[in-house]
Image: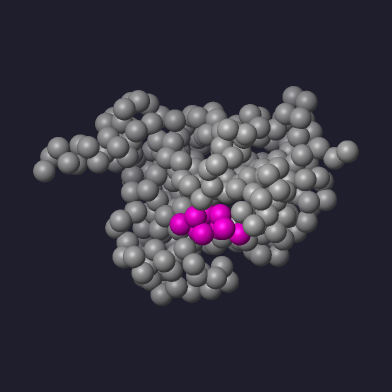
Amino acid sequence: MNKDVLVVIGTGGMGEAIARRSGPGRTVLLADFNEELLARLSESLGADGYHVETHPVDVSSVTSMGSLTERAASLGPIAAAVHTAGLSPAQAAVDAILRVDLLGVANFLDAFAAVIASGGSGVVIASMAGTLSAGRLPPELEAALAATPTDELLSLPFLQQLPDPGAAYGIAKRANQLRVQAASMQWGGRGARVNSISPGVIATPMGQQELAGDSGAQMRAMVDVSATGRLGTPGDIAAAVAFLTGPEATFISGADLLVDGGAVAGTRHAAAGSV
C-alpha cells in the first residue's frame, strides 16, 4: 500500500522545516528550481530516515507544474501540498517576482486542485506584506487578482505599472491570499482544503538577506513593536502548516493565518497612537 504523499515546493529554510515536521511516515516529494539545493536537502533528509523523492520544477510554467503533479499522484494519495517557493524584493526584479510569487502560486492552486486526495489539504506561504496591502488596493483590483484566469494574470494592466520590486511583492502576496480564498471552492469539490500562511520576519537565509537590504530598518522596527519582540523561526511556520494540514483544522479552508509574532498588530497600534 502506498504511503500518503507530502509535497513541499521550495527547499529553503521553511521548506526543510515543514518536511521535517510533517514528513515522518509519508513519502516526501521535494520540488525546487535549484537542483543542487534539491539534492542536498534530499540527501540530508534521507540520512535522517525520511522517505524522500525529488522532482525539479519551474513554478511559473504550467507544463512544469503539471509534470510535478503527475509525479506526485504516481507516488500515492496526496495528503498535503505546501508551496513555499518565492522571491523577495531583495533578490529579484519586478518581472521575476510576478512570475514566481504571483503566477507560480496560481499555477500551484490550479494544478493541485486536480490531484489532491479527498481529505487532503494545501498551504500557500504568502506574507504579512499581503496583509498590509489589504485595504490599500481598490476593490476592482483585488477582484481582478482573485478571479482573473491564470493564463491572463500577468497581462493585467496595473501590473505593468508597478514601480519597484517591493510593490510587486506586496501585490503578489495579497493575490496569494485572495486566490487561495477563491480556490477553496474548487478544492472543496474534491473534499480537500486549502489555506495560506502569512509569515512575518522569519530567520531564514532569505529573511536575513531582506534584513540586510534596503527595507531592513523598517522590518526591524516592526519586530521591535511586535508583542513577541523576536524574529520568527522556520519551526514557527512548520508548526502552523502542521496545524492547517492536520485533523484539528478540518473546518478551516480559504483562510489566511498571520504568523508574524504580532508585528502587523504592533505596527498598526503604533500608527494609531501617533495620530
User: Residue placed at 68% from the left, 44% from the top?
Assistant: 119
User: Residue placed at 60% from the left, 48% from the top?
Assistant: 193
Where is residue 263 drawn, in percent x and y? 33, 36
Along the viewing direction, whichever of 48 and 132 lies nearer the viewer: 132
Q: Main secondary structure of the magenta part?
A: helix
Can residue 180 be found in the magenta stretch?
yes
Where is residue 17 drawn, in percent x and y? 60, 32
Q: In the figure, 273 relative to 104: above or below?
A: above
Write the start and end of the magenta stretch as one range. Answer: 178-186
User: Residue placed at 72% from the left, 29% from the top?
Assistant: 24
Along the viewing direction, whichever of 6 and 91 lies nearer the viewer: 6
Among the 4 quarters of the image, the one containing residue 139: bottom left
Q: Is residue 250 left or right of residue 170?
A: right
Q: Quadrant of the C terminus?
A: top left
Along the viewing direction, whichever of 11 and 107 lies nearer the viewer: 107
Q: In the figure, 117 relative to 208: above or below?
A: below
